[in-house]
Each structure stands twice: as structure tokens, then as C-alpha cells.
Image (spheres, coloured by chain):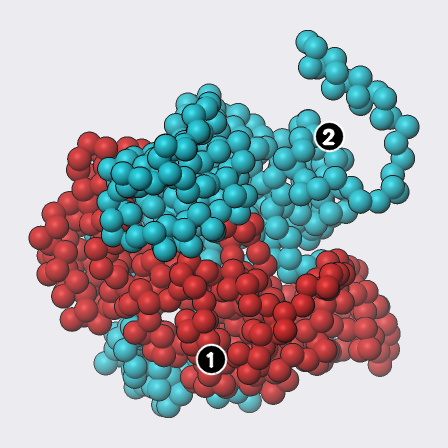
Chain colours: A cyan, B red
Amino acid sequence: MAKEMHETPNLDELESGPWPSFVTGLKRLAKDKGYMVDLLGQLETSYKTRKGYWKGGTVSVFGYGGGVIPRFTELKDENGEPAFPEAAEFHTLRIMPPPGMHYNTDILRKFCDIWERHGSGLIALHGQSGDIMLQGCTTENVQKAWDEINVLGFDLGGAGPAVRTSMSCCGAARCEQSCYNEPEAHRVVINNFLDDIHRPALPYKFKFKFSGCPNDCMNSIQRADMAVIGTWRDNMQTDEALAKKWFAKHGMNELVNDVVARCPTKAIQLKEVKDVKAGDSISAVAVSDTHCLEIDNRDCVRCMHCINVMTGALAPGKDRGAAILVGGKRTLKIGDLMGTLIVPFMKLDTDEDREKLVELGKTMLDFFADNALEHERTGEMIERIGLVAFLEGIGLEVDPNMVSQPRTNPYVRMDGWDEEVAKINAKQNA
Amino acid sequence: MSQAQAATPRRPIECGVPDAKQYMHPTLVKNFGNWKYHDRPRPGVLHHVSHSGEEVWTVRAGTQRQMDVYTIRKLCDIADQFAEGHVRFTIRSNIEYIVADEKKVAPLIEALEKSGFPVGGTGNSITMVAHTQGWLHCDIPGTDASGVVKSMMDQLYEEFKREEMPNRVHISTSCCEINCGGQADIAVIIQHTKPPVINHDLVANVCERPAVVARCPVAAIRPALVNGKPSLEVDEKKCVCCGACFPPCPPMQINDPEHSKLAIWVGGKNANARGKPTFMKMVAAGLPNNPPRWPEVNEVVGRILHTYKADARPWERMADWIERIGWPRFFEKTGLPFTKYLIDDWRGARANLNASTHIRF
């Protein structure tokens, strides 16, 4: 044992119970590291006093401005010296994960070895923005740890007023609901903004997130300044064998109550096989010899519910791509903002398609950098200037998909109406 | 100064996000973009079938997120011995082992559970809590994160391992009102109840005063001369105790061991499935910040989950369930008091009032 443990009666209570205990992990590290003995001492103090004791500061690696989260203790003794001196510095390195957070054991073991040598040995997989968080490092060792991690092919993530580390779902790697190549889109987009990640110089943070379908497993609509959410334009695909298998197992009650009745736009109907409509927008699949599901794809909003319930029997169409939403964020300071749809559909099949996504991101980020106030997120900026001003600023045409309904008040200057109508007519006739 | 520091530092290799394919299970690489459907043979296991006919089984297990290297190496040992050396992590810090051979599933589950990692978190279970850093690492936390989550998951352990809820349940915790834990079916978030206590000796040296004034959402902060020193003052009648001034100005101490309480929010949903995505709504507050196990918070969370489990229909998320039964019945069934503080008066508040005669009796 490196050093005698401090008494930790509060933390000790978090070692009981069936869920894996982070305290047990911290204590295991403390067997070899006085650093972690003192960390436990400070954490136990927080549990007693119900106060936090870390303050920020300035620590970075050579060549970058961000990516390290500095932490210096504020828990001092009567002489103004750190009460737990070995853990007086406890910085975090944020490392960008591979898209979908895939690893083999070899790379994870390398991370462990490096972090055991230079840091605390505590790793969070993963932080809320998706970073691999190497938690607990002295100022002196930050560069040493970073030098070894960087040559593994990993790079620091974002912090402060910068483009932030991104996340993408498992997507095409394992999910049949994937509507685009999420890992590739994630990687191409983020790797085009490395300067804005590593050298924070924006009004505030800017987050991209990538979800492969409207289930939005990355929670992008509520968190991302630019959310890329997969969807499709053509008719839903069906598989009769899987539909019949599902029905045989689940029966009519579940089909009616869990599938048909839960369709938000009533696009799906249960019909007798003989009554099923044919048509360009109809997807139909028999669930038995007598009954059939009929979906009018023009009414379907691609919510995913029926597909989630009857996986494989119903599936996204073949003409897949993504919708783009902007401005999602949580509370501070004006209240929660959901992302707003600004691009209903774009293809993301080829490098050329992904280049267009990068261009859209660049245009949006440039506009943000030029127009947002200090500490203002994209959603707050749009709230302040209006969606139309934002669209005009980034060169996108208005589309009725962007609203849940048209305006409900007359308070607007409309002397440009005829001109706008003429423009739309000219475009339609072109 | 050590030798390493004295030498010219290495310039970073600005390599960005690595290619995931080098770490992916080979069957995933081979069938990339070609998956046909999936099912769940048992809680904690996903079975995906490709159009090529190839299959993979994914075994999902809970972790403590904040992991020591010994835990990660243990997880790697299990991957090497019982799986095929490839893992991935979910957004909620669950680990997933991917195997192309069904026969490996049962021994893998046994190895994980024997080592203390519960297998579950799939489908209509209560999965791992998304959380923040808390006292362990954050510079502005009102409470801890890992400890709250540990105590919560101890209580919800069996529900993690089963698929018995009406639909999936996502929970988050956050140590300040910034809510890094995020929107969820149930969220536990610090709610301060007193204005910041200002250390006027430090403000002038530590804080950029105009920036702090600009941060306040209700314009309650103004520059002031206090005891002859330039400082800031707060109009305490206007202050909503959000804590936005604290990060840019640590001398405006918002955290209070007694008066920083915990609030509980329900009905956030990010999926577009069925209804559009929803924000969560505050339904309880004033709960004490009570380490090491926060029993009062866990009691309310448990009560809401128990009511939801008993009352919601299949596939209803928390938000869908409440939309069907209505808010009066939600408060009645959970026994939570509906107070005047739960009526919104922030911008856009009228959209949250009942502008109809839709009333359930």
C-alpha cells in the first residue's frame, strides 16, 4: 500500500449493493497510488460538507488551446495549503472516441497502460459529449500522457467555446434502421472542423450529433446545434414472412393496440386482404391469410414506431438519407430549445454528398461565429434573430416542413409578399 | 523542471476522429449497412440478422462508467476469453460484447455476472442512468453524480436485468441546472432555492463583471461598489436562483449544502416514435441533497416508476402514459403534491396552460 487510507465512512456505504461500485474502483487504484488516496480524501470531504472543491484554470498541451479540463483543489488547510496535497491537481484529458464507440481489447489495454503510468488510472467511458475521459492527471504529466495517446491515432476533444466532440449511434455497423453511413459522416464532418475543436474561438460551444434514424439514439434533437438524423423518402419496405411470424407470436390485440392505434398520423390501417388498396404510395403486407397492414406512405411521418415494434416485417425505404435540424440545447439561459428542421432530406451516400454536409456545417458555423453574441448558442441566436434571417444568412430556401403551423398573428411587415410569390412562381416555371 | 519539459515539446498529430472500422467486430464490418432485422432472445441480448444470412449476438452489461483500469482490464479479459475481443459502449455507459457464435452467449453472460457486471439494459428495461461528474471532478457541482447513480441503480438493479417496464426507461441525473445529464423519462436535477452568496472581496479580481451581468436570464445582476470595492449585486426579488452567474464568477456562490435541493422531472423523450420529441416537466422539488445514498430522491423516483409500471400500456413511454391519463391523475396516482411552483411563468408559458375544456373526471 502506497499510503495510509483516509477514513471514508460515507463513500464506504457506496460499496454495498449489487451495482458495480466506482468507490471500490477508486480504492483499488489507491492501493498503488497516493494520488488516489488523497482524491478519496477530498471526495469524502465533499460527501460530508456537501460542497465541491475543484476550480478551473489553464492547462493545455503544446499546440492546442483546448481539450484538457484543468482542476485544482480549493480544499485548503488553515495555512492555505491543500488539505489533500497529492491530489491538488486532478485534470481531465478529453479524447474523441471512434464513431459508434467501437473498441478492441488491444486499444483499451493500451489506454489503461498509459493512464496507469501518467494519470490516476480512472477512465470514464464516456462523458456526456461522448469523450473518452481520462480523469485525474497532474499538470506535469498531461503532456506525457497526451504524447503517448496521440501516437495511438487518437486526438483531443473540444472544450470551451469550440466545436465539441461528437457522437454517432451504432448505425450501419449493426442496425437495420440505419439510414446513412453514420460513422463516415461523423468522421468526415468532425475532421473538417479540427481547428475549431482544438483552438476555441467561437462565441460559444457548437455540437454536431449523428443519429441514423428518427429514434435519435444520440439524443441529437435536444442537444445538438446541428443534428443529422437519418430518414427516408420512398415507401416503407415490408417482409411478409417476418410479418406473419410476428403476428403468429403477438396476435390481433397487440397488432391493433400496439401498432395500428399508435400511428401518430393514422397512416397505417388494418384491412382484410381482399380490401387492400394498390397505389404508388401504398406499402402493404399480409400478417395472416385474412389480414393485412396497409400504409399510405404520403401520410407517414417516419416516426419509427411501427418499425420498432415489427422489426424487419416493416423497414425504412431504400431511398435513405438524413434530415438536418439546428439549435437544440438545454436550459441556460433562455429555456430548453428543441432542434428545428431546416433541411428535410439530403442524400448521404457518397463522398460528394458528405462534402455537401460539411459545406452546410461550415456555412452555419461561419454564420454563428459572425452573428452570435458571446455565450449564445445557435438556438438562442435563431430565437433572437428569427428563423428566416438565419435561413437567408446561410442561403437556404423556406419550406413548409420547417414549421408546425404558419404564423398565428398579423404582426409582420409584408410589403415584399408579391415579390416572394413571383420568385416562387418563377422557380416553379423554370 | 524535468528534462521532458525542458526539451522542445512534440507538435500534436491533428488526426481527429479515428476510423471505427479498425476496432469493429469483423462480422459488423462485413455486413456494414446490410442488416435485415433484430430480435431480443432474452433481456440483455440483441440478435441481429443480416441480408447475407450472417448473424451476431450482442450481450449488454452495466458498468459504473467511472472505471478504474483494473475494471476495464477485467472487461477486456472477459472479451478475450468469452467473446471475440471486440466491444462497444452505449450512450448510457453500458458495455456491449459482440459475438458471431450463439454458443458463446450463455458462457459470456455467466462470466459477466460472476464478475459483477449485470446483463440487461435492453428493450423495455430501466437502463443505466446518464450522468455527470459531480463532486469527483466538476468545478460547479451542487451534488455528486456517480454516488447518486450508484444508489439509484442498486435500487433499480432487477429492473435493469428484466424487460418488464411498459417501454424503455431513460433516467438522468445532473449536479446543476445546466443539466449535462440531459433530457430523460425521469431526470434528477439540482434546484437552488437561494440567491448566490457573494464574496465581494474577490469579485473584482476574479470576474469579468459585464459578462456576468449579461449571463443573468432575468437581469437581476448589476455592477455595484461594495465596501469601496467594485463588485456585483443581485436583486434578490428578481433572482430565479438558476446559478448561471456562478461558472463565470465563482465568488457568486450558488451551491448551498442546505438550500440546494433536488427536483425531479418526467416525460422527456428524444425519439420521434409516436409523438414528436418532448421536453421533461418538473413534478417534484425540495428534496434534500442527502449523501451518500439520497434516500428521499430514490423514494420519489421509485414511486413514479412503480406507478408507471403498474398503469402504463405497452409501448407507452413516460410522456405517452401521462398524455393518456392526464396530469391531474399523474399527481393523484403518484401522490406527489401539485404546487403553484409547477405552473410555468417563463417565456412561452401560456403554451403550457390548458387552453381547452379537455378535462378528465
Q: Amino acid at mark 1?
A: Arg
Q: Give the image location of residue A81, x and y in percent.
A: 52, 81
Whether residue B248 is visible: yes
Say what secondary structure mark 2 lies in.
Answer: helix
Residue bearing mark 1? B303
Locate the N terminus of chain A by quadrant.
bottom left
Q: Amino acid at mark 2?
A: Glu
Q: Give the image location of residue A266, x and y in percent.
A: 52, 43
Left or right, residue B157 beside residue A414: left
Left or right, residue A21 beside residue A381: left
Say what secondary structure mark 1 lies in.
Answer: helix
Whether residue A141 is visible: no
Q: Give the image location of residue A187, x and y in percent.
A: 42, 36
Chain ID at mark 2: A
Judge whether B299 appears above or below B14 on screen.
Answer: below
Quadrant of the rendered structure where residue A213 is?
A: top left
Residue bearing mark 2? A392
Chain ID at mark 1: B
